[in-house]
Image (cartoon, rainbow, N blue to C red):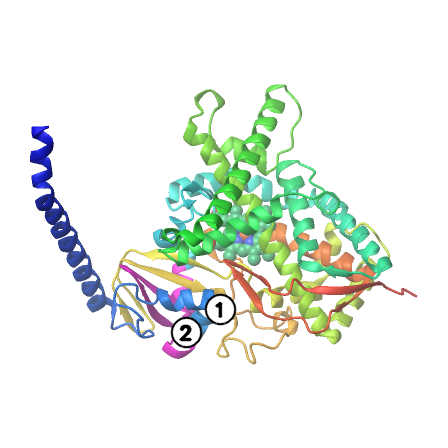
Amino acid sequence: MAIFTVLLSWLPQALLLVLCLFFVAFLGYCLYIKHLHLKYDHIPGPPRKSFLFGHSPIFLEVMKNDGVIHDKFHEWSETYGPVYRINILHYVIIGVTCPEATKEIMMSPKYPKDKFLYKRLFNIFGVRFLGNGLVTAQNHEQWYKQRRIMDPAFSSLYLRGLMGTFNERAEVLMDQLSEEAESNTVADMLSLFNCVALDIIAKVAFGVDLNLLKYSSPFPKAIETCLKGMIYYIRDATFEYFPQNWRFINEVREACRLLRTTGAQWINERKTAIQNGEVVPRDILTQIIKSAGQEESITKEDEEFMLDNFVTFFIAGQETTANTLAFCTMELGRHPDILEKVKKEVDDVIGMNREISYDDLGNLTYLSQVLKETLRIYPTAPGTSRDLPDDMVIDGIHIPGGVTCFLSSYSAGRMEKFFKDPLKFDPDRFHPDAPKPYYCYYPFALGPRSCLGINFAQMEAKVVMAKLIQRFDFTLVPGQSFNIRDTGTLRPMSGVPCTIRHRNIT
Ligand code: HEM
């Protein structure tokens, strides 16, 4: 009782002490931010909205209005030049569109993936998400080891062997479109492409038949929820402290858990098959299991690491490709002359064949140009970022080391100085004889950390688009928006609703 009375008499002093300590810490933090402002403010950039939060209120405003954050980056790169500065709390980020600097930073392993973004993708709202998987690994050795193990599942020999699956899954989509054509219903192309892309990655990477065009599944929604949660988690440091967001945050956590528990189940099934001496494919799942080390010494962290890569491939292998297909359909719908040209090429190369071969893909050169142009205006994974540990000079401006550098493929792809009349959809920019863009076009990133699935994605996109164009005429439902929805990756806001008709092939 006496102790309690003594403690109570100390309470006001203790509270005062805590308050003083908090105040001193806060003052110290503010002084540190001021120091950073003095160190980096010679780099041009938009005015800060707040001393503490820097430019982040601008981002929150864009998000609130369902805008695309990359339009802001684009506006700033046009206004402030090839290198501009952004502040968020004690982070300094520079946006770079200078081709020389883009080349130096992306092509060299000297500049690791940055802590600001990729560390925050390790987990979202306390649930492990992409962890130390291939996209997010920052440590060079750890990344390099994984990439070497994964490489065989993306070799051109292995990919050639996947043509059967690409054809077969795309045929299921054609059957579905056939039904839509016969019943005269409107097809939501984005959601159909989402299903086919997820079906393909599940089959090819993990040996699982989802058949999403026939059976409903929680996965497409879970992926969308994770991505939506991811952008709030990255762009709004205060999001999780507001009770009105807690319900959504719980949905995001549940969605992350669903993907990881599914991964654990599929990995265990494959391990059992291996243990039973069954013949298993050398697919991504087998490589993921290999990357975790030897069976007898497997630790909890190894298990988590396998799930990191499972979620990485489940998401990276589906989202961006489906969105690219949807944007491509949208642009072809808006440009009947270009669509006619692709149709002619598809008819010449594949004619009435149902099975598209690997060699056919090489002959669909105009379709390749169309897909490249789609990704110039709509880079579905719109950029990448790196840490700049040491001082460097970009476009004559001294950049003290210790900043994050953001390279926006979206912004570079829409700049007049790199692409004349940039918003015009013109596949001839990528004609084989046209000059190659110089470090201003990188929808798959460049250098060592470029997309591992680039060939996979291009093959898949060509098979699906070629079959669609071979069999159907599609018309965009009038009045739809051509805006972009920013969910970290970019997707067409409308979902690209189309009416579908069987083609009259004479
Ligand atoms: C049109 C489709 C695709 C686009 C536009 C795209 C774009 C990109 C971009 C920009 C990056 C760099 C990300 C960053 O730096 O944060 C990346 C990385 C990656 N992508 Fe893709 N991607 C596509 C399809 C795929 C597919 C189908 C797969 C797998 C089957 C895949 C697997 C990966 C992996 C594993 C990485 C990490 C590579 C590394 O750091 O070693 N991607 N992708």
Amino acid type, callout 1: Asn
Question: Closest to the observer: 253 or 438?
Answer: 253
- Left of 477 or right of it: where is 268? left
**For residue 332, above or below residue 192:** below
Q: Earlier in the sequence, mark 2 or mark 1?
A: 1
Q: Is residue 4 magenta?
A: no
- Left of 426 or right of it: where is 88? left
Q: Quadrant of residue 331?
A: bottom right
Question: Closest to the observer: 286 or 307?
Answer: 307
Mark nearest the camera among 2 and 1 is 1
Q: Which residue is mark 1?
A: 65
- Left of 148 or right of it: where is 243? left
Whole-Å distance between the Cαs marked 2 and 1?
Answer: 21 Å
Segment colored magenta:
78-105
- Left of 101 or right of it: where is 12? left
* Residue 142 seen in the figure: yes
The structure residue drawn at horizontal position 44% and vertical position 40%, both measured from the top left corner, is 128
In the rendered image, residue 490, in percent from the top left (x then y), is placed at 55, 61
Categorize mark 1 by other alpha carbons within 10 Å: few (<14), some (14-19), many (20+): few
Categorize mark 2 by other alpha carbons within 10 Å: few (<14), some (14-19), many (20+): many
The structure residue drawn at horizontal position 75% and vertical position 48%, both measured from the top left corner, is 167
Q: Which residue is mark 2?
A: 77
